[in-house]
Amino acid sequence: MLFWKKERQVQRDVQEYLQAADQCVEGFRQAAEAYLAEGITQRFEQLVEQVHSLEHVADQERRQIEASMYDKALIPESRGDVLGMLEALDLVPNQCSSVLYQIWTQNISMPEQFRDRFLRLVAPNVEAWGLLSEAMRELFGDARRIRQLAPAVAAKEAEGDQLERGLIREIFASDIDKADKIILKELALRIGDISDRAEDAADRLVIVAAKRQS
């Protein structure tokens, strides 16, 4: 009974982590949309700080889970799998915060001609996290649902890759300054890294879920 009670606590802790991470990624979406609509404004800066705070909350939740699991909340094999899974997940909100700070600290000015294309790039990257978060909520539940959602995460990553490549081609075909081209290319790549990391985490989640079902 004690084992199952502790595992249920880990499940609750994971749900709390995901709630904080969800808010962080949603904050990223709002901040990106504000930036692409208005540039670097006070509202954008407030959203950046908010995302940073939410990322910190998610990190704290992850550390709490780690502490609970080392208190023999799960058998050692499951413990390592879940800890590794959480570390892979945590790369996504971290990347969201990092992208916003890149925009802010480098004071990146977005040419009007690329605003819509960047906005379209943000969408599948955020959606990839949403699908991953949904799948992670089934870690202690329905492994079949995880196997259904993982390919959807990969599809969003592929959609993002296609948009990213098209955007970079458009950037370098434009007549803006070469230095600005490089800055915008790097920003596009960093946004694309969000769904790349989500796909990596989804692949790992499928393996972890399969091991728990075996």
Image: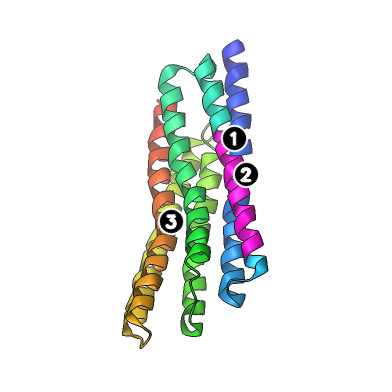
Q: How many labels were placed on the picture?
A: 3
- The local crowd at label 1, few if under 14, some if 14 to 19, many if 20 or more residues have their Cα within 10 Å, is many
Query: Which element is circle 3 on?
Result: helix
Q: Please report the bounds of the magenta region as a residue range.
A: 45-62
Q: Indicate whether residue 32 is drawn in magenta.
A: no
Residue position marked by numbered label 1 in the rendering: 61
Cα distance in 3D space between marks 3 and 1? 22 Å
Of residues 31 and 206, the one nearer the viewer is: 31
Of residues 75 and 182, the one nearer the viewer is: 182
Give, as a three-letter code, the residue at label 3: Ser
At 41% from the left and 67% from the top, the residue drawn is 188
Cα distance in 3D space between marks 1 and 2? 8 Å
Q: Indicate whether residue 60 is drawn in magenta.
A: yes
Q: Earlier in the sequence, mark 3 or mark 1?
A: 1
The relative height of residue 186 versus residue 207 in the rendered view (above or below) is: below
Give, as a three-letter code, the residue at label 2: Ala
Of residues 205 and 193, the one nearer the viewer is: 193
| Chief secondary structure of the magenta portion | helix
At 44% from the left and 27% from the top, the residue drawn is 212
Residue position marked by numbered label 3 in the rendering: 195
Query: Which element is circle 2 on?
Result: helix
The picture places residue 74, in percent across and down from the top left corner, at 50, 19
For the C terminus, give its image quadrant.
top left
At 46% from the left and 30% from the top, the residue drawn is 82
Residue position marked by numbered label 2 in the rendering: 20
190 displayed left or right of 20: left
For the N terminus, give its image quadrant.
top right
